[in-house]
Amino acid sequence: MYKIMFVCHGNICRSPMAEFIMKKLVSDAGLSSSFIIASSATSTEELGNPVYPPARSELAKHGIGCSGKTAVQLRKSDYECYDMFIGMDTANIRNMNRIFGSDSDGKIYKLLTFAGRSDDVSDPWYSRDFGRAYADIEEGCKGLLIKLTEK
C-alpha cells in the first residue's frame, strides 16, 4: 500500500489536480486498492474552499471529476501517516520541511523529479495556464506511478 500526499500552497489548483490525476492513473492501471492518495495545503488561505473552477474545468476536459474536494492544511502529524509527500514547487518543499520540522525519513519529493525534470509545476493561479499545469502534473504523476510499480 502506497500512501501519497500531494501538496501545494492553497490546495485548490495544483495539488488537487495531482490527487485526482493520480487516482485516475492508478484506477486505469487496476491498482486503486494499492494506493491512498490525498492532497493538502501548506497555507491556511483557502481552507474549506472547493477546487478552483478553472482547475476543475481542466480536469473535466480529461474526464476527471473532483466533486466534494475542499482545501485542507498539511499537519505535522501527517508525516507519520503517509509514505510520500509530493510538492509542486521549491516553496512547497521548504514549507513542508518547516511544518514537519525535518524530513528525517526522506519522504518529501518535488513532483517533476519523477519526470526527470528539476523545475517547478507552473502555478496556474498566477499564469492562468491550467492546460500547462495539467500537462506537467500528468507527466510527473505518470513518472511517479512507473517508479512505484517498478519496485
Image (spheres, rainbow, N blue to C red):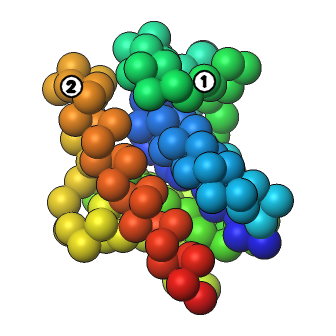
Say above or below: 127 vs 72.
Answer: above
Residue most toward the top? 53
Residue 116: percent from the left, percent from the top?
25, 73
- Residue under pointer 2: 129
Residue most toward the right? 33
In this picture, residue 100 sits left or right of residue 53: right
x 48%, y 78%: residue: 147
Report the amino acid beneath label 2: Asp
x 52%, y 25%: residue: 63
Kind of element beneath mark 1: loop
The one nearer the camera, 64 or 74, is: 64
In this picture, residue 145 sits left or right of residue 68: left
- Residue under pointer 1: 65
Say above or below: 84 vs 54.
Answer: below
In this picture, residue 98 sits left or right of residue 137: right
Residue 52: percent from the left, percent from the top?
46, 17
Return the disc, 1 or 2, that comes first in the chain's sequence. 1
Query: Which image quarter: residue 79?
Result: bottom right
Q: Residues within 10 Å of mark 1 (few under 14, many from 20)?
A: some
Q: Give the spatial CA distance, label 1 vs label 2.
A: 19 Å
Report the amino acid beneath label 1: Gly
